[in-house]
Every structure is written in C-alpha cells, then in structure tokens.
Amino acid sequence: MTSKQFSLEEVKKHSDNKSTWVVIHNNVFDVTAFLNEHPGGEEVLLEQAGKDASEAFEDVGHSSDARDLMTKYKIGELIEADRREIKSKNIEWGSSSDSSSSSQSSLKSWIVPIVIGILATILYRFYFQS
C-alpha cells in the first residue's frame, strides 16, 4: 500500500493552529491534535507549520519515544519532486572512527565534572572540618 503523496505547496496551506502540518524527513505529519500536548509548547510546532522541519526536529534531539509517537500523526509523504536528501545525525555505535572520538569526548564531559566535584569535596573537608 502506497502512502498518500503531498506537494510542499499543499503542506504550506496548513500553517495555523486549525490545521498544522509539518514535513520531517520527507514524511508529512498532521500535528494539529498534538499542539496542546507538545512538551515544548504549541508555539514550537506552529513556528515550523507548513514547512520542512527536519533540521529543527533533529537539532532538538528528540528521544526514540518521540520518534515512535510521530507515526501516529503521519498522513503521507512528499511528492518525489519536493523531496530532500535525508542527512542523518545519528551516529551508530562503532560505525566509524568518528564514533570513537565522539564517545571519548562524551566520556570526558562526565569525568571532568565528577573529578572536580570529588576534589572540591576533599578540599572542603580538609579546610573547613576541624
């Protein structure tokens, strides 16, 4: 079964709180019913209404639960002529050399504050405890 196809011009017509459509990764979503439930507020969705919101969606870093919830609101796909190349920001574990440096910097972002916290605790106890 093929999905219903929409043009970007058709999506642009649905850009208010009465009918709110967004495009994410070439899929069209009617998020009108989700406006009041969106954790970031309805303004965030209305700002992207009628547009390709793929970049904004990825920049926020939505959880896998949010991505699963999206399927409920999918109404179709963009027509071939209006599609954009999907650029994935998700790096698979061990998929490239970048992932090891990414995980190392992520590890450093946790270790440094922990070490500073431990040192601060030791110094506090040493200087302010009799």
Image (tube, helix red, strand yellow):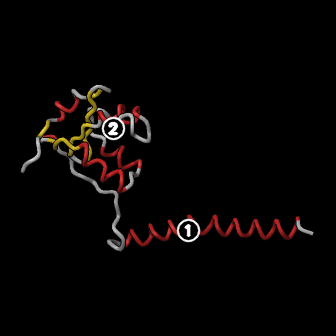
**Residue under label 1:** 108
Q: Could you say whether the residue bearing mark 1 is in a helix, strand or loop?
A: helix
SS at circle 2: helix
- The C terminus sits in image quarter: bottom right
Q: Position of residue 122 (x, y in %)?
A: 78, 70
Q: Nearer the viewer, residue 3 or 82?
A: 3
Q: Which percent across, then down, holds residue 49?
A: 30, 33
Vertical position of residue 122 compared to residue 6: above or below: below
Q: Earlier in the sequence, mark 1 or mark 2?
A: 2
Q: Amino acid at mark 2?
A: Phe
Residue 119: give x, y in percent of width and height: 74, 69
Image quadrant where residue 113 sits: bottom right
* Residue at 37% from the left image edge and 73% from the top image edge: 97
The residue that mark 2 highlights is 34
Q: Quick one: which residue is furthest to the right in this view?
A: 130
Tag shown at residue 75: none
Query: Can you tell which of label 1 and label 2 is closer to the viewer?
Result: 2
Depicted 15 relative to depicted 120: above or below:
above
